[in-house]
Image: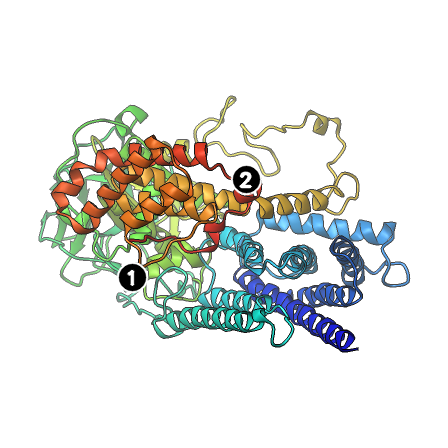
């Protein structure tokens, strides 16, 4: 009887533990799913997700309490996902809840529509039913995985890797836009999973009872400390996912008098277009070109770009001097007449490289370095004539290997550019050989739709005091000033002199004249290239036809294959541009491709997606471990002793051997040689590695640097000895223990 009572108590405790673990699983998945708030414009996705996750975990708890085996529990949960999908998202379910051909087809159609939105949409997107269905399906499958790992297999720590996958999709779509509280919520959910998962009921008074309680307390304290540290770091230091301070202040910009444009670009706010006013009428312009009013060379991380260093220049009457430090590029010499209408400003807009200007009156000055004509006296605007060079250099000149020209160092000033912004610029241009190719790559970052940037008259709400980082990594929407400001910063980050040009697009063609209005106000970028001088780039992804790309830039951003249209020829709406022919020869039969909701051929991809998710989840620890190993091997070859030592410790950890933080590196090495039975080559290499590590940590820097070249070879020999004498089992390779602990050094 006593035994039976103890057995019943144990069973009841186990049942309660299983229920608590199921609740912890549901909480962990739902809290981690808050990362999706970064890609949705509303929260309507959460209710179906809540129903799906709660139902799956409830089924797991009930079936376990009934004594079902783990494979049957998982199969039942998968069937429940199918039932819930047709119940929540189809109006044609049999008896309202059972899947049938019509309901399955409807749900598959919705998933197809969701796939199209994922492919073409730019976050944040409305959480429409198709996306709700896709997310509910994904969270349901994730819940099954986490439930199996954390409850059935008793490995809640490994389940954390599956939870981490929930951040992969929104992070890839929103690109570093994830809010700090989404990570804090996920950390809290994972901590709860660890706490509950560490509770294993044991008979009272048994020798294991005290140790079990101690383990519970240790896990709880560690999890609570981690969650508290995350919350404290995020809430009180204000550090978000990008390392910036959330809670920024708006920066205002001062407008000039009359209908002139602003003297500097603001990285936030709205472009004021209360009414459209005609500003100029241009005669004699045979092709589209930008009309430049001013250039801005000083970057202020809080205000954007503004004027600085404008000189008295020279009188603007007669022939004008060439730009400072710049040769005259190849191009077309033109002459136009510009009639100001509603324009009142101290800046005289000009085209290209001005050769001479006349008719505007007296007291106008020209600054060759800035490429600006201005006046210091208020005077009426008069029609004026400009003769100028419209640059169109050939590719050979643009990619010239001439020495870098002398240019004012102010155009290379990187003050205020944060490390993450500079790193982005370097990553984008790392494979480009010339400065022109680097500039084109940075321009393409903004104009390629795949990168998620879009033109809007309202910028995204600020999340930090750094407007450029806000725009590049989180907001990704704004108007021309944001795009020009960001690209100019990126150019300077890779050593290319840059400035922001402010003026107007080509305006509207009226036959013999062009009319430019306030709607044509624009900002673009000018980069100083060897052998060419100041060269125009435009990163703003306008879709209304107002972009006036120079021919050399249009050729790079919009490459075509034969047959090519003549210069200036446009492709009629509805026709495919050259180079984008249909890839599927069956499309020529006239049979339209099936739409997103068509059932034919679309029913396989959800199963494939689930399979890919399962394989990715299974291989995530192995992939992460391999990436870490390669990074450390590369770092050790470059002289990082700490990276080499961390890799040795993880190799030992993967094989089940731990080390204490109180041990010296030499003591740890001796024990590793013994525990893993390293051969003489491996033992000798490990001792040499320890010597290098000690010199790096405690010795003179010069002595440490003398051994840097040997670190890569020493680490390679140690790893080879590990593999020869103590190879990993398939389970140790698939689930390496070292990925479940932070990397570090010991000694």
Mark 1 vs 2: CB contact within 8 A = no
The picture places residue 78, in percent across and down from the top left corner, at: 75, 54
- Residue 180: image quadrant is bottom left
Examine the rendered structure and indicate whether residue 613 appears above or below residue 308: above
- Residue 23: image quadrant is bottom right
Q: Residue at x 42, y 68 (%)?
A: 230
Q: Label 2: which residue?
A: 729
Q: Residue at x 48, y 49 (%)?
A: 656
Q: Residue at x 44, y 31 (%)?
A: 724
The picture places residue 666, in percent across and down from the top left corner, at: 27, 47
| Quarter of the image where the N terminus is located | bottom right
Front-most of residues 400 and 354: 400
Q: Label 1: which residue?
A: 262
Question: Closer to us: mark 1 or mark 2?
Answer: 2
In the picture, measured across the screen, residue 453 lies left or right of residue 584, that is: left
Q: Considering only order in the chain, which callout, 2 or 1, is on the residue closer to the N terminus?
A: 1
């Amino acid at each position: 009887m006593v035994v039976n009572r103890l057995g019943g108590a144990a069973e009841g405790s186990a049942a309660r533990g299983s229920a608590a673990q199921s609740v912890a699983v549901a909480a962990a998945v739902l809290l981690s799913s808050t990362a999706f708030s970064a890609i949705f414009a509303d929260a309507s996705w959460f209710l179906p997700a809540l129903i799906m996750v709660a139902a799956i975990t409830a089924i797991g708890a009930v079936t376990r309490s009934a004594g079902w085996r783990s494979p049957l529990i998982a199969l039942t949960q998968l069937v429940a996902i199918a039932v819930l999908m047709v119940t929540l998202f189809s109006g044609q379910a049999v008896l309202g809840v059972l899947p049938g051909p019509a309901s399955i087809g409807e749900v598959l159609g919705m998933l197809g529509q969701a796939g199209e939105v994922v492919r073409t949409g730019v976050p944040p997107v409305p959480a429409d039913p198709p996306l709700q269905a896709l997310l509910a399906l994904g969270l349901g499958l994730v819940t099954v995985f986490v439930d199996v790992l954390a409850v059935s297999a008793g490995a809640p720590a490994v389940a954390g890797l599956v939870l981490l996958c929930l951040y992969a999709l929104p992070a890839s779509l929103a690109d570093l836009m994830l809010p700090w509280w989404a990570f804090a919520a996920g950390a809290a959910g994972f901590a709860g999973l660890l706490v509950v998962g560490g509770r294993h009921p044991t008979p009272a008074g048994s020798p294991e009872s005290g140790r079990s309680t101690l383990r519970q307390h240790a896990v709880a304290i560690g999890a609570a400390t981690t969650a508290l540290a995350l919350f404290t770091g995020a809430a009180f230091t204000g550090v978000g996912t990008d390392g910036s301070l959330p809670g920024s202040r708006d920066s205002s910009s001062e407008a000039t008098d009359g209908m002139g444009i602003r003297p500097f670009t603001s990285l936030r706010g709205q472009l004021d277009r209360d009414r459209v006013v005609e500003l100029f009428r241009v005669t004699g312009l045979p092709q589209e070109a930008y009309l430049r009013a001013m250039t801005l060379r000083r970057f202020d991380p809080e205000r954007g770009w503004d004027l600085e260093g404008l000189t008295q220049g020279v009188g603007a009457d007669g022939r004008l001097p060439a730009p400072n430090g710049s040769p005259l590029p190849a191009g077309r010499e033109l002459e136009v007449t510009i009639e100001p209408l509603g324009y009142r400003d101290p800046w005289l807009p000009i085209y290209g490289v001005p050769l001479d200007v006349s008719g505007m009156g007296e007291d106008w000055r020209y600054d060759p370095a800035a490429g600006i004509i201005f006046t210091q006296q208020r005077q009426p605007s008069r029609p004026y004539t400009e003769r100028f060079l419209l640059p169109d250099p050939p590719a050979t000149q643009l990619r010239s290997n001439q020495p870098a020209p002398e240019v004012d160092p102010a155009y290379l000033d990187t003050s205020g550019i944060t490390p993450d912004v500079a790193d982005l610029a370097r990553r984008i241009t790392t494979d480009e050989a010339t400065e022109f190719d680097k500039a084109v790559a940075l321009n393409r970052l903004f104009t390629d739709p795949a990168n998620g940037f879009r033109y809007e008259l309202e910028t995204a709400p600020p999340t930090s005091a750094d407007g450029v980082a806000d725009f590049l990594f989180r907001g990704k929407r704004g108007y021309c000033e944001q795009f020009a400001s960001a690209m100019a910063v990126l150019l300077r980050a890779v050593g290319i002199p840059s400035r922001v040009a402010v003026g107007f697009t080509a305006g509207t063609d009226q036959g013999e004249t062009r009319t430019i209005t306030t709607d044509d106000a624009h900002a673009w970028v000018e980069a100083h290239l060897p052998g060419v001088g100041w060269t125009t780039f435009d990163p703003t992804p306008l879709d209304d036809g107002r972009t006036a790309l120079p021919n050399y830039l249009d050729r790079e951003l919009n490459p075509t294959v034969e047959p090519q249209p003549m210069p200036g020829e446009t492709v009629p709406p509805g026709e495919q541009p050259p180079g984008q022919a249909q890839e599927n020869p069956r499309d020529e039969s006239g049979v339209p491709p099936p739409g997103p909701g068509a059932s034919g051929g679309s029913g396989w991809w959800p199963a494939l997606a689930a399979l890919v998710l399962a394989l990715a989840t299974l291989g995530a620890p192995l992939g992460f471990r391999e990436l870490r190993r390669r990074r450390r091997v590369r770092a050790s070859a470059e002289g990082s002793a700490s990276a080499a030592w961390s890799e040795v410790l993880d190799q030992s950890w993967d094989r089940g051997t731990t080390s204490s933080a109180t041990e010296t590196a030499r003591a740890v090495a001796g024990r590793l040689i013994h525990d893993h039975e390293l051969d003489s080559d491996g033992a000798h290499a490990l001792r040499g590695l320890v010597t290098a590590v000690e010199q790096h940590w405690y010795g003179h820097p010069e002595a440490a640097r003398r051994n840097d070249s040997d670190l890569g070879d020493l680490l390679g020999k140690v790893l080879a000895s590990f593999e020869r004498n103590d190879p990993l089992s398939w389970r140790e390779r698939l689930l390496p223990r070292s990925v479940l602990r932070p990397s570090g050094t010991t000694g």
